[in-house]
Image: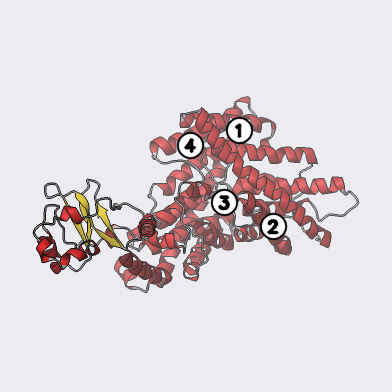
């Protein structure tokens, strides 16, 4: 089977492997979904007890200990890890990640932490895809696509939304809508969703009541976009602020997670609607079963943002999809209640209409991914009759929020540390190359005590204009001799026995190492205005030369290869 697959056309290989990954992604989503339901069924009867305030703290601590001490991994959303692997490591993810994040998310969310199962299941699906691609010996470019297949299958399955899974992967994980990636990713999302439907039924997660939409409701969408922008920016900054301050104040990670969970439990005692993933609260709002006034809804918006920041910022494990949907739903409900309070004579579309749009606005803004928000909300609510309104709010929210927060919550830390490389950019193509594979080793070395006549003999032997000078005792690199530096001496044979190499060599020559990024190498080329640079080992020994011409030649080949995956 393995050999037969490798004989097939590369595109057909990716399609067949994507189907396998789709099945695995669908099964992972079903497993996590049912585990959360079982966990919730065990915890819910105890939620009224006074000691229930400790549940989120216990879950967060156990989650942190499991990830950091048992699995030797870090917590977080999960999605940034997938993006980093795609951006910097050719899609490589450890196999243990395929189940470690599911367990940690189960502990965090099941105990009441404000997080979602989507982020962990994305990294689990991506890990499965990565290891399947490695098993079949796929190239890095192909592995990246298969990692995307795992992510799309997981999102499509957990939301019963295959188109949203495709949009999320192309827009957030891979960062480009390349046609060559679309077919395998679409196949994986459809297969993963089909597995979920086979095991759990084909149900719309959040059904809503029908509502008439007038022209004034569309105008009101402009104002709602401003509120969803505020909520999304507040959510992103809350997670970041809690992480920064908790790390500064509390050194022990398990204690940070426990204190964050304890505060979440304390808030949940008074506002239980903000605990857990919150999907049941969304269903109640879309069915118009919430009677809270405008002030209480505003409090719920702020509380959900706060508990999400405390859960994820302090070290809990989980995703941001679910909190974004809940915050957006509360924001839309608040906006509708405010409109009714300010203009009671106007007949507005209804609270479920604005709640639905609020979800689209917040999730699009937080992820900086309008297409994902549009397709996700349309599929999980069946609200295609308000597609125009969803598009309007999503696009406006992303446009405004991008001025305040230029990058999404998933890319912020990666951009800050230089770990994110945008696909299709020069830096991305260069990142797929390394100094070692571009190294030119056919150099003729010189020693500082050599006479000019020996140098002339080496020039006759070699084909290059650059000659490295090495210490004859330990082989350490001392400098370079360029043919232009000795050109004036070559026509004076009387100097051949009096001029030494050390008199004509350049000592302060910039060097690069085998581990240097090619972007840094190109910067040196421009700064020094040279076409070749010496490459030196960590112990100072000369390794070879790297030339701008060789880099450009390999760059062209890599560009052609990436266009024909």
Name the residue furthest left.
Answer: 497
Name which of mark 2 and mark 1 comes first in the sequence. 1
Q: Position of residue 384 (x, y in %)?
A: 70, 63
Judge from the rendering whether residue 414 lies leftward or rightward of residue 531; answer left or right.
right
Judge from the rendering whether residue 142 lies leftward or rightward of residue 312; answer left or right.
left
According to the picture, the residue beneath numbered tag 4 turns out to be: 63
* Pointers 3 and 2 in contact (C-beta within 8 Å): no
Picture quarter with the C terminus: bottom left
Whole-angstrom CA distance, mark 3 to mark 2, is: 15 Å
Name which of mark 4 and mark 2 comes first in the sequence. 4
Name which of mark 3 and mark 2 comes first in the sequence. 2
Picture mark count: 4
For the question of whether residue 25 can be seen, the reply is yes
Name which of mark 1 and mark 4 comes first in the sequence. 4
Disc number lying in front (2 or 1): 2
Whole-angstrom CA distance, mark 3 to mark 4, is: 25 Å
Q: Position of residue 291 (x, y in %)?
A: 79, 42
Disc number lying in front (4 or 2): 2
According to the picture, the residue beneath numbered tag 1 turns out to be: 264
């Amino acid at each position: 089977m393995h050999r037969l697959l490798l004989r097939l056309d590369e595109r057909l290989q990716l399609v067949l492997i994507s189907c396998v990954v789709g099945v695995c992604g669908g099964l992972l989503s079903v497993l996590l979904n049912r585990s959360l339901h079982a966990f919730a069924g065990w915890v819910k009867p105890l939620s009224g007890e006074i000691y229930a305030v400790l549940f989120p703290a216990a879950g967060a601590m156990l989650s942190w200990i499991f990830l950091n001490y048992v699995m030797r991994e870090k917590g977080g959303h999960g999605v940034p890890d997938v993006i980093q692997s795609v951006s910097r490591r050719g899609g490589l993810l450890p196999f243990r990640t395929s189940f470690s994040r599911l367990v940690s998310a189960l502990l965090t969310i099941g105990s009441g932490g404000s997080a979602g199962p989507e982020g962990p299941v994305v990294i689990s699906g991506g890990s499965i895809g990565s290891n399947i691609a490695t098993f079949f010996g796929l190239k890095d470019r192909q592995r990246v696509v298969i990692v995307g297949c795992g992510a799309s299958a997981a999102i499509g399955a957990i939301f019963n939304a295959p188109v949203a899974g495709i949009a999320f992967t192309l827009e957030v994980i891979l960062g480009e809508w390349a046609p060559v990636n679309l077919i395998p990713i679409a196949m994986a999302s459809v297969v993963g969703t089909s597995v979920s439907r086979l095991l759990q039924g084909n149900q719309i997660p959040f059904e809503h009541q029908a509502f008439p939409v007038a022209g004034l409701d569309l105008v009101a969408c402009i104002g709602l976009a401003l509120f969803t922008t505020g909520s999304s920016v507040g959510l992103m900054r809350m997670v970041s602020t809690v992480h920064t301050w908790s790390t500064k104040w509390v050194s022990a990670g398990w204690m940070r997670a426990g204190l964050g969970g304890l505060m979440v439990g304390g808030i949940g005692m008074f506002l239980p609607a903000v605990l857990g993933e919150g999907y049941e609260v969304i269903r109640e709002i879309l069915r118009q079963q919430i009677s809270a006034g405008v002030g209480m809804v505003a409090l719920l918006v702020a509380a959900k943002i706060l508990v999400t920041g405390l859960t994820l910022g302090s070290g809990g494990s989980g995703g941001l999809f679910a909190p974004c949907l809940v915050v957006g739903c509360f924001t839309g409900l608040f906006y509708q209640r405010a409109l009714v309070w300010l203009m009671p004579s106007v007949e507005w579309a209804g609270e479920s209409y604005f709640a639905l749009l609020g979800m689209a606005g917040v999730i699009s803004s937080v992820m900086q991914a309008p297409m994902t928000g549009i397709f996700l909300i349309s599929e999980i609510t069946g609200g295609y009759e308000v597609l125009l309104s969803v598009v309007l709010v999503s696009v406006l929210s992303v446009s405004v929020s991008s001025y305040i927060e230029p990058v999404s919550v998933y890319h912020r830390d990666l951009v800050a540390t230089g770990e994110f490389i945008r696909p299709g950019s020069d830096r991305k193509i260069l990142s797929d190359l390394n100094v070692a594979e571009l190294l030119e080793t056919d150099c003729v070395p010189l020693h500082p005590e050599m006479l000019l006549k020996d140098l002339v003999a080496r020039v006759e032997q070699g084909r290059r204009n650059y000659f490295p000078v090495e210490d004859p005792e330990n082989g350490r690199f001392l400098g370079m001799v360029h043919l232009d530096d000795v050109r004036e001496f070559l026509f004076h044979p009387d100097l051949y026995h009096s001029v030494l190499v050390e008199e004509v060599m350049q000592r302060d020559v910039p060097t690069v190492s085998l581990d240097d990024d090619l972007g840094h190498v190109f910067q040196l080329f421009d700064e020094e205005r040279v076409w070749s640079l010496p490459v030196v080992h960590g112990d100072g020994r000369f390794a070879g030369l790297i030339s701008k011409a060789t880099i450009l030649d390999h760059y062209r080949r890599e560009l052609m290869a990436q266009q024909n995956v």
